[in-house]
Image (cartoon, rainbow, N blue to C red):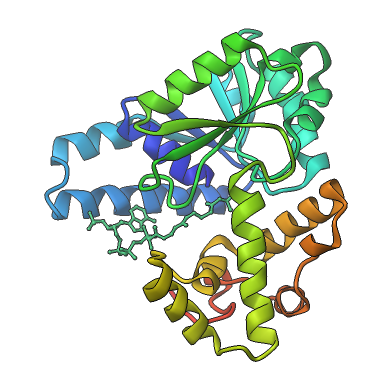
Amino acid sequence: MGSGIALTAAQSGITAVQIDVSQPALDKAKASHAKSLARLVEKGKIQQADADAALSRLSYATSMGDAKASDWVVEAATENVELKKKIFKEMQATFRDDVVLATNTSSISITDLASAVGKDASRVIGMHFFNPVPIMKLVEVIKGLATSDETTARTIALATAMGKTAVPANDRAGFVSNRVLMPMINEAFYAWMEGVAEPKDIDQIMLLGCNFPMGPLRLADFIGLDVCHDIMMVLYRELGNPKFFPCPRLRQLVQAGRLGDKSGHGVFQYPAK
Ligand code: 3HC
């Protein structure tokens, strides 16, 4: 997601630094940025000069310190509360004290993450993007208990400048998007496990019958089965309702390392990229 957010920012005229502890992950992001922009030029959607300008606005770093003059930061690490809190503490120590500390978490409490930065909690906000970030129109904006109105207004303005529509949601596990989407995906796994239909037919029914752009099982692979599983666990723990417990079929695939597109095999199999 971080890679998509950085690319979208750069295409919107914003200088962006993508930070990752892994140099290979940054190399992959850089190659993917160049490929995405080249494809847009090929299709005639943008001019070569626009692609070159977007690329020139992008840089990559393994250390937060290399981006310390930034005006804004969006954390987009994996959905692990302790890891995210550690990153928030580092963000607080690295960036100026007027910088908004946003998180692209898909389900974790903003108030909980903000507790990692104490007095700076008013600058913490959820800025939830959707995959593929350059295409999807929404940014779900989530205020924590201490998030200031100024932080919220600035976040809506930035999302708008990035060509997105910002829609507010309150700070409950999964917010709106994943509170509704993930149980639907989980239910598709139950339908498969109980033999209601084969995966391709479950997807086809939802595609043709409900006008989904992709079926729920294809979407689960696209998002990552581990991510779907982790979000269900956050819903289960935080909302205290057994209906959110991940389907055994989903758990089993994750345990087997079948994570979806990124591992080449999830519900469906994918050719090596
Ligand atoms: N980056 C940039 N552009 C992309 C892209 C990507 N990764 N993938 C597809 N596109 C572009 C294509 O180039 C094409 O552009 P064009 O119309 O200008 O030629 C356009 O999107 C349509 O792509 P395709 O024709 O290849 O295929 P589809 O029509 O099936 O669209 C899709 C692909 C946009 C991914 C569509 O299937 C879709 O909208 N799927 C649902 C995605 C979704 O639900 N995302 C949300 C996931 S939940 C989430 O992110 C939250 C998190 O917290 C879990």
Which of the 4 image quarters holds residue 84? top right
> Residue 76: x percent and y percent?
61, 40
On screen, 32 above or below 166? below
Query: Is 253 or 47 nearer to us in this picture?
Result: 253
* Ligand 1, image quadrant it occupies: bottom left
Query: Is 256 or 170 nearer to us in this picture?
Result: 170
Q: Is residue 208 left or right of residue 215?
A: left
Q: Is residue 38 left or right of residue 234?
A: left
Report the number of discs.
0
> Residue 272: x percent and y percent?
45, 78
> Residue 198: x percent and y percent?
55, 90
> Residue 148: x percent and y percent?
66, 12
Tell me the residue at 60%/42% (across/down).
20
Tell me the residue at 72%/73% (across/down).
254
Q: From where the camera sits, is residue 271 visible?
A: no
On screen, 4 above or below 249? above
Q: Quadrant of the C terminus?
A: bottom left
Q: Is residue 174 left or right of residue 165?
A: right
Tell me the residue at 48%/77% (across/down).
203
On screen, 68 above or below 182? above
Which of the 4 image quarters holds residue 231? bottom right
Q: From where the camera sits, is residue 61 visible?
A: yes
Query: Is 16 or 124 nearer to us in this picture?
Result: 124
